[in-house]
Amino acid sequence: GPPSALYLGVYEAVKTHLLATTTLEPLVVYLLAGALGECFGSVVRAPAEAIKSRVQSGQDASTAESVQRVLVESEGRANAVRAWSASLWRDVPFGAIQLAVFEGLKSYIINSPQVFDVDVDTLLAEAVLGAIGGAVGALLTVPMDVITIRIITQGTGVEPCGAPPIGFVEMTKQIWSEGGITALFTGWKARTFYWAPAIGIFLSCYCSFRQAAIVQGLFT
C-alpha cells in the first residue's frame, strides 16, 4: 500500500508537470514519470519485501522477528540496502514500462476511433490494458527480479552456506555461471502471469477511484 501510493502520487505529479512544461513525447513522459515514481516507492518497498521474503522462506518465525533482523540489526540493514540497490534495476524499469504501455495503449485507442470503438475509461477496459502493461513490464524485468530475489534471500539456503553477501554485479555473474540466459529467466511464466492480473486490478481500481474523486471535486 504505502509504496504504491508513493509510486502513483509521484507519477501523477511528474507526468502533469512534464506534459504542461515540456515538449517531450507523451510516451517518454510516461516512462520518466513512472521511473521516478518507482524510485520513491522502492525506498519503502525494498525493506518491506526483505521482511516478507524472510518470513516466507522460513528464516524468521514471525514478522516482528524479521523486522528486527532487517531494520534494527546492522547486518540486516546492510543487506536491505544491497537488496534495494538491486531492486532499483527491476522496479524502476518495471514501474516505467507498465504505466507507459497502459497510458500509451489508452492514448492510441482514443486517437484511433475509426479502428477502435472502445471506451477506455471503463473498469473492464482499464483492467485489460493494465494487464497488458503488467505482463510486458514483468516479462522484460524477469532477469532483474531473479537477481534481486537471490540477493534478498542470501543466507536462506539458496546461496552456499557461509558465503559472504554479494551485490548486484557479483550475483548476476554467479547466476549466469549457473545457467546463462535460461537461469536469468527462471520463473518468467509465473512472474508474467502473476503481475498481469495484479496490475490490471491495481490500475483499474486506481483509475476508477481517481475518476470518482474528480467527479466529487476532491482533486483534478
Image: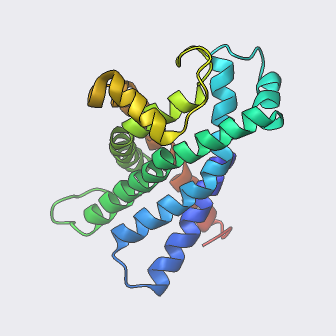
On the image, the x and y values in percent for residue 48 come to 68, 37
Considering only vertical position in the picture, is 108 above or below 201?
below
Q: Is residue 212 left or right of residue 68?
A: left
Residue visible at 59% across and 25% down in the picture: 153
Residue visible at 66% across and 36% down in the picture: 79
Quick one: quadrant of the C terminus?
A: bottom right
> Looking at this view, is 169 or 185 the one in front?
169
| Quadrant in the rendering for residue 80 | top right
Q: Is residue 217 left or right of residue 115?
A: right
The answer to whether one can see residue 173 in this image is yes
On the image, the x and y values in percent for residue 217 come to 66, 70
Considering only vertical position in the picture, is 171 above or below 118?
above
Considering only vertical position in the picture, is 119 above or below 54?
below
Q: Residue furthest left?
A: 115
Residue visible at 45% across and 66% down in the picture: 32
> Looking at this view, is 83 or 206 the one in front?
83
